[in-house]
Amino acid sequence: MTRPILTPRFPATPEQINAQVHAFYARVREDTMLGSVFNKHVHEWHAHEEKIAAFWRNAILFERSYDGNPQRVHIERSDVKPEMFAHWLDLFEEVANQMLPPETATPWVALARRIGVGMKAGVQSARQPKDAPPIL
């Protein structure tokens, strides 16, 4: 693991990140909207959670331990719909508020929502017919 050079975006520990990711995906697996999509594509949950925790450690703690392209992955899954992102984020917020102190949950949810806007826009754009005007 590469040591971060920058201070964290907000107070969070690797253990809190791991716990949030684990609790969140436990809820996702059981969720009526998201569960079937995730269960179709994720076959090794431990590895998936490790990868997502690395994403968040990179985004929050600047660890530089994540290697991936989440935008591409979501676009390539045709059953991932733009309208799912709002529900995903609401569920993420619910779990964060249960698992984390407010000084961690609040800025993490805000960061997740900012990232979610871009992810939703990317998926929405990819689902548009090729001759459609761009979504602004």
Image (cartoon, rainbow, N blue to C red):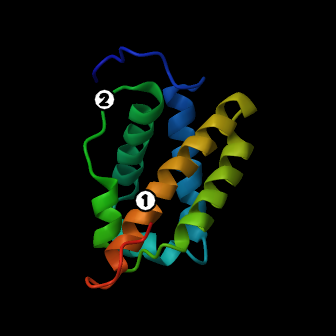
Q: Position of residue 51 (x, y in %)?
A: 35, 46
> Position of 32 compared to 126: left or right?
right
Q: Is residue 12 above or below residue 87?
A: above
Amino acid bearing label 2: Arg
> Position of 80 compared to 2: left or right?
right
Image quarter where the C terminus lies is bottom left
Residue toward you, 103 or 44: 103
> Position of 116 compared to 86: left or right?
left
The answer to whether residue 43 is seen in the rendering is no
Q: Is residue 69 above or below residue 11?
A: below
Residue toward you, 42 or 34: 34
Q: Residue at 42% across / 71% down in the picture?
A: 135
Residue position for label 2 = 64
- Mark number, residue 51: none
Image quarter where the N terminus lies is top left
The answer to whether residue 90 is seen in the rendering is yes
